[in-house]
Each structure stands twice: as C-alpha cells, then as structure tokens.
Image: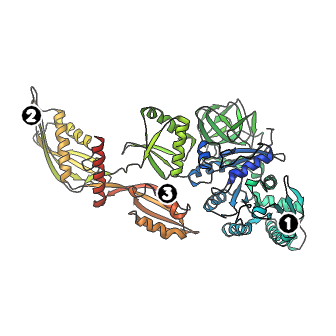
Amino acid sequence: MKAYRPEQIRNVGLFSHGGAGKTTLAEAMLLNSGAINRLGRVEDGTTVSDYEPEEAKRHISVNLSLLPVEWKDTKINLVDCPGTLDFAGEVRQALRAVDAAIVLVDAVAGVEVGTELVWKQLDALNLPRLVLVNKIDRENADFARTVDQLRARFGKAVVPVQLPIGTQDRFDGVVDLIRMCGLRGHPPAHGEIPDELRAPCDQFREQLIEAVAETDDDLISKYLEGEELAEAEVLAALHRAVDDAKLFPVLVAAGGANRGVATLMDAVVELLPSPVERGAVKAKDPSGRETQVKAEADGPLAAFVFKTTADPFVGKLTYFRVFSGTLKSDSHVWNASKGHEERLGQLFVVRGKTQEPINQLVAGDIGAVAKLQDTGTGDTLTTRDRQVVFPPIEVPTPVFSVAIEPKSKADLDKLGTALHRVVEEDPTLQVRRDAATSETVMSGLGEQHIDVTLERMKRKFGVDVQLHEPRVPYRETVQRKAHAEYKHKKQTGGHGQYGHVVIEIEPTERGQGFEFGERVVGGAVPKNYIPAVEKGIRETLPEGVLAGYPVVDVRVTLTDGSYHPVDSSEMAFKLASSQAFRQGFQDASPVLLEPIMDMTIVVPEQYVGDVMSDLNGKRARVQGMEPEGGMTTIRAQAPLAEIQRYATDLRSITQGRGTYTLEFSHYEEVPAHIAQQVIAESKKQAAAAH
C-alpha cells in the first residue's frame, strides 16, 4: 500500500441497526477498489470483515473491523461496526478512531432502533455523516418513504443528493442531483435523467440547493436574488456543511448487487472531511491543562489505542489511530497514560484478519502493532518529551451477569489467564469474585455478548465453563433480643473439655455489622478465654443459621458462664459460644435480608406505562419520573433477586430503546413468603452438596 498524506485520508465508520447491510457494503467497496477479486457473502461466512468463527456462525458482526480501501488517490479507512446492541462497546471504540460516518438505513425496514441510538451518539460528537438508503433492490423497498422517515426523525438537515433510477428489481443506477445527470453501470457512466424522474429530480434539487445555500452567507444572497449557483460552489459549500454536521446528504445503493456503491465511494472522497479538515483534537498535557492536537505528519507524536485483541498465536494486537506526527516501525514510544516506555516492533495496516507490514503511519492514519507489553485500550502513545493524554473511551455499563465455573480441573488452571485476556480485549466486560457468594461473576451488555465471550474463551484459550444465574447475596439478622446458654462438656480419658457461656443477642442499626461485648462479673469466665468466645461467634457468622447466608447487624454480649480449672480450654469456649449463638439466633426472631438496588431507567415516553407495569410485578418502588425531550427517566428501587435478567426484559418491552443503570442501595427484609422459598431452596442445595 502506498504512502498517503493526512489530507488524502478519510476515516469512516459504517453504522446502522443490525442487518442493514454494512458488511456487505464494505465487501463491495473492497471489490471496487481492487483489494479483493470476488464478493464474499455474510450468509456463507466468507466476507473480509466478519472473519471470526462467532461472526460466521451467527451471520452478524461481533467486532469492529478495519478495512482500508484505496480510491481515487485517497485512502479510505473503513471501520465496519456491529449493529447488535450487545456489542455497543465496539461502536464506542470505533467512534474514537473515525472522522465521519456512513449511516445505513434499510430501504424496506426504514429507520430502526439502532439507527436512532447511533444517530444520538454521532450528534453528541458532532460527527459528519452521509446517510445511505441501502437494499433499494429488495421487494417493498421505498426510497421516498425512507427519506420521509429520516427527515421526520432527524430533521430537515437530512437532504437527498441522489435519487434511485428504478426501484426494487429494476434499480439500475442513480441520479446525481448536484450535477443533474444519471449515473449507470460500473464504473458509473454519465447519462441522461429518465423522463419520468425529471419532475421529482427538479423538486429534490431545489430542496438541496436551498439547504446548501442556507449554510453559506454568500450563497444565500445569490440564491435569494435568483442567481444560478455554480456546481463547484454548491459542492464546496456542501462539503463545508457536511464537515460542520449542518447537512447530512442521503445517497442510495444496493450493496449486495454492488450498484450505487462506486458513487458512494466518490461521495466519501468528495464530501467527507480528511483528518486535517476535521481540525484539532482535545487532549491534556502532563499538568492537566487542555491542549489541541493537530493532524500534522511532522508534528509531535500522539497516537490513541482504540482497540486491543488477544490472540493465542500472535499475542496481543493493538489497534491505534495516529492523531499527530509519524509513527515508525521498530521504534520506542512513551505510553503517557501509564508513564512508561514501549518498544514498537513491525507496524501493520490491517484489513480484516490480514496484516500488511508498513514502515510508518502518518497523522490521520490507522494501523496496528503486535506484542506491546503494557499498553491497553484507551492509552495514549507519545514521546517522553512531548506528552499528551487523550480522554479514555466511555463504554456502556454492563447490565447482564452470569456466574461461571470451570468444567474441569484443567479448565480451572487456565481460567484466570483467559478471563484476564478477554477483559483486556473487551472493556465492556467485567469479571469479579463475589466474596459474599464465592462465585466468579461475569457481566456484559446482554445474553448474546456473554455467549460470544464464552465461545471465544473456548476457541482461543481452550477454557470450557458452565454458567448459571448468580446467587443473590442474601444476609441474615435478628429482630429482637434473646438470651442463650450452652455448656460444652466432654469427658474422655485424661483431660476433658469444658466451656460454659451465657450470651445475649440483639439487633443493631442496619449496616452496623457485628459487635461483641462482655459484662462478666466475678471472673465467671476468665479474661483469657473471652477472645475465644468472640472468635467462636465470628467464625459462625459467615454461614448463618437460617439459610447459610452471612449474619449481619447483631450485637452479642457475653454475660455469664463457668469454667473448669483443668478441663477448660480456648477450643472448648469457642465451641460453646458457637452453639450458644446458634440457639440464641433462632430465638431472636431471625429474618432474611435482600439487597435493594437503585435503578435509573431511561425510556421513550410511549413505553413508560409498560415499564411501570413490569416494575410493579418485580416488587419495585418507583421514586420519581422526569420527562425530557421525548424520553422519561424513571428512578426506582427493586430487589436484586427480581431484576437479574432486567437487561433482557427492558430490551423486549422497549424494542431495544430503553437503557438503565444499577447501583447497590441497601439491605431490607425479605417478605415472609419469599423468605420461606429461599430458605427451602438453600437447605435443598446444602443437602445435595453433602
């Protein structure tokens, strides 16, 4: 691949709802550029982009994929992103590498949930974008209806710059509304506009010219005075308006048939900004002050790591975008995020799973390097004397959890390493050891996300696990004061065992934990045995009396007892206090406590009723609602036991439009009828274990 200057580069992400045809479109662009010589198919698992077995099996993209394309003396770094909500973390990573977006919309399905979600993210970043109405060759495809939907959802800034010639199986090319000509064939040849399209073309061109003129003071004056605007000035003004995210041109294609794709590639070169045109990017210097990083090949080095993949054969592969300066193979760089030096080996330009060695990458370009020691996703690479740090990637919070355990001893030995590698590869995954339940809990963005991760662990690291719903970390406590007495007395040959305690058990404030005290008079229990009494009780707390859950918020006071000058020992008093505690606990009105979570749920207004109804069925308490801009934020508290699968439920109720976060709030008493079920289940499991 030849060397390109920053102004010859376009970094473009492909975004859409799942199934709108991003991967197939990318395949057609690769074919047109000569990078491949035959079209792969998603259904056959033969595309350049979806190269992982998990993608071929499901016929969806799971990872972002880099696909550099050379077109008209320009290098287009395509980033094909998953459209499935479970892999939204990949979209966030891609957004940090690109300067512009192509948003695909299915000409049959129209604007879908994923379209709306990604549009919001692009708006938040003020990212330039083209809209492609794709699959126009399908039955029931309707360009006009889709454009109406786009304008209704996203406003008048969405303007067609092309119209389809023919539709469905008669789709034959496009009309270029700027140059007012037909473009048919491959490569596209200029021709006449069909007579039946003349009137709609004139109407859409007028809308386009008016929209473009309104973004430019000089052009609006000319336009209002009735002057004809030259093609060159319309194109230049449209390019500026796209760069400023003031206009979003709509194009049309049939990616699977490779029709309209070459004209889309022309539009990428002509209308989307280069890294230089996108302007400076914000970063911070070592003192924490904000600074600007410009896309200059001879500037100070600043590169951002936006993705890391773990490979058992190649090792770690680090994907980065150079924002300033020039990165060279076999050089030393400074990781400004971690504060240490890294040695770079051979740099690569990555296309799907293939890696082409390259000597250097200039500002604006995207590449990869293998086997970096300590550099991870979100790190900034610079020189030691000119350090800056880019902000980290904000990834979605995991909302779906499973408990995992290895299937065999061999799996157990490899599990720790495999978990470390998959979490390093995917920042939206979290793995933790739950001290309360002694389970390894993996959390992700949904059921499919977890399934894919476990398949990947098995394929890459040979680790097989089984999963189940995480145990709820219940607690046990008491509601009233009770007294208990226990005498541990054993007589065998030689020394016997003797320990005798009288204790008082009472509840404390919620959250206060365990307290121990003593009010022994007259040396009934010698001072040197009192620590053993406390130890015996403390050792009983983790596996409580009711259902084996930890005991909390109790105060135990040693009030009396007796001892034997020969047979008493620390062990005897430990055993006596443990048994006394168990007896007293049962007499002090024991109850089960459950974790209550704070929920913040954001849903479109039309789903509020259904969400509230569902929450009522989950023993939730709604604490407030705040409507704003067509969305409603619901604040509620609910028992963890009822919302372990809420990610799936909310997605189903809101068709994927709802989001939520969870945070632990406090413990409170489990209703009696539910407590009985929990206790019975716990006893059943304990019996099975023995």
Residue 486 location (% of width, % of height): 13, 43
* Residues at discs 1 and 2 in contact (Cβ within 8 Å): no
Q: Nearer the viewer, mark 3 or mark 1?
A: 3
Q: Which residues are magenta?
A: 643-648
- Near mark 3 (Cα within 10 A), the count class, few <14, some 14-19 or many ≥20, is some
Residue at disc 3, secondary structure: helix
Q: Which mark is residue 243?
A: none
Check the picture and name the quadrant holding the N terminus. Answer: top right
- Near mark 1 (Cα within 10 A), the count class, few <14, some 14-19 or many ≥20, is few
Residue 595 location (% of width, % of height): 37, 54
> Of 421 and 382, which appears nearest the observer?
421
Mark 3 vs 2, N-terminal side: 2
Per the image, the residue denoted by label 1 is 218
* Residues at discs 3 and 1 in contact (Cβ within 8 Å): no
- Near mark 2 (Cα within 10 A), the count class, few <14, some 14-19 or many ≥20, is some
> Of 322 and 613, which appears nearest the observer?
613
- In the rendered image of this protein, does residue 621 appear above or below residue 544? below
Alpha carbon distance from label 1 to label 2: 104 Å
Give the residue drawn at x 85%, y 66%.
218
Alpha carbon distance from label 3 to label 1: 53 Å
Give the residue drawn at x 74%, y 69%.
144
Per the image, the residue denoted by label 3 is 648
**Residue type at the position of mark 2:** His
**Residue type at the position of mark 3:** Thr
Tell me, yes or no, whether the highlighted magenta stretch contains residue 489.
Answer: no
Mark 3 vs 1, N-terminal side: 1
In the shown orientation, is residue 675 left or right of residue 457?
left
Per the image, the residue denoted by label 2 is 564
Give the residue drawn at x 29%, y 43%.
688
